[in-house]
Image (cartoon, rainbow, N blue to C red):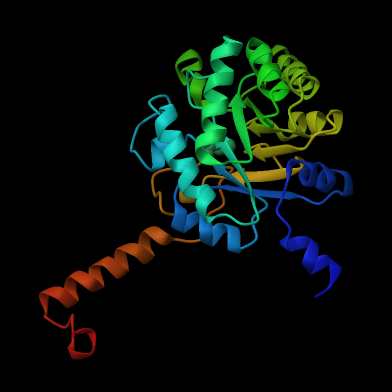
Amino acid sequence: MSAATENNKRKVTTHRLKEMKSRGEKISMLTAYDYSMASIIDQAGMDAILVGDSASNVMAGNVTTLPMTLDQMIYHGSSVVKAVKRALVVVDMPFGTCSGNPELSLQAAIRIMKETGADTLKIEGGEEIIEDIRKIVDAGIPVMGHLGLMPQSINKYGTYTVRAKEKAEAEKLINDALLLEKAGCYAVTLEKIPAKLAAEITDKLSIPTIGIGAGAFTDGQVLVMHDMLGINKDFSPKFLRRYSDLHATITNAVQNYIEDVKSQDFPNENESY
Ligand code: KIV
């Protein structure tokens, strides 16, 4: 086996993501919320798997990510961790668990790390929660920041449109990104911001940026698995590329099964004991 192949099979760490940025290798990240899908995604060679609080939307059917609880994130996180051998596993801290009380935030972070076995956490927010992030990082827990569109703050903004198009918000975003790096974050997710701004931040930071709707010049890309596999039919933002139409594939398979049951074609003799 070549050294490159051997190297590729090694467990991905936060350090390896930084190395990838240094040599200009793009980082691939995709969400997963359960054992079976995480296993497929890991074996396909994904660098990082995000147990996103988008589970609230795509798994639980909620309109926003706000209802997600710590226990629910731990359930999804531990299911994913059991399946993953190579990818870095990142678990989202859910709404309300990291919001300006560093001691409480650390307790929540420790619970996720202990009870899921995940490698790292992702936290939405900048300057307002910088002390929380510092406390968590200082306790030995790697943190990926999350700036730009922050779905947990949807009630504050009232819309999911592109963020930081105006100068003042763009300047705050750059400042927040620098603060996150200084506080010890190993990477930052940039969601739905202009490509030019994402490129500028990527250039300014020594840690990797992972974009979603942030253009081509971030150090990596992340998508929600249900969106890119075409399981969701109703969500079609400009930034999304669909790699499959699982909605049609699954509908077709399920309809064939119904038909076979009704027509008594299934089960046949070979499928019986
Ligand atoms: O929860 C999630 O899936 C996320 C991605 C959109 C980055 O945070």
Which part of the image, by quadrant, shows the N terminus?
bottom right
Q: Is residue 77 visible?
A: yes
Which part of the image, by quadrant, shows the C terminus?
bottom left
**Residue at 67% of width from left, 38% of height from top?**
211
Q: Residue furthest right?
A: 23
Asked if residue 34 is positioned above or below residue 103 in the image, the reply reads below
Looking at the rendering, which quadrant does residue 235 occupy? top left
**Residue at 79% of width from left, 34% of height from top?**
199
**Residue at 61% of width from left, 57% of height from top?**
85
| Percent coordinates x, y for residue 58 in the rendering | 40, 42
From the viewer's side, name the closer residue of 6 and 249.
6
| Percent coordinates x, y for residue 149 in the rendering | 58, 26
Looking at the rendering, which quadrant does residue 207 occupy? top right
Q: Is residue 228 visible?
A: no
| Percent coordinates x, y for residue 103 in the rendering | 58, 12
Asked if residue 97 is positioned above or below residue 63 in the image, the reply reads above
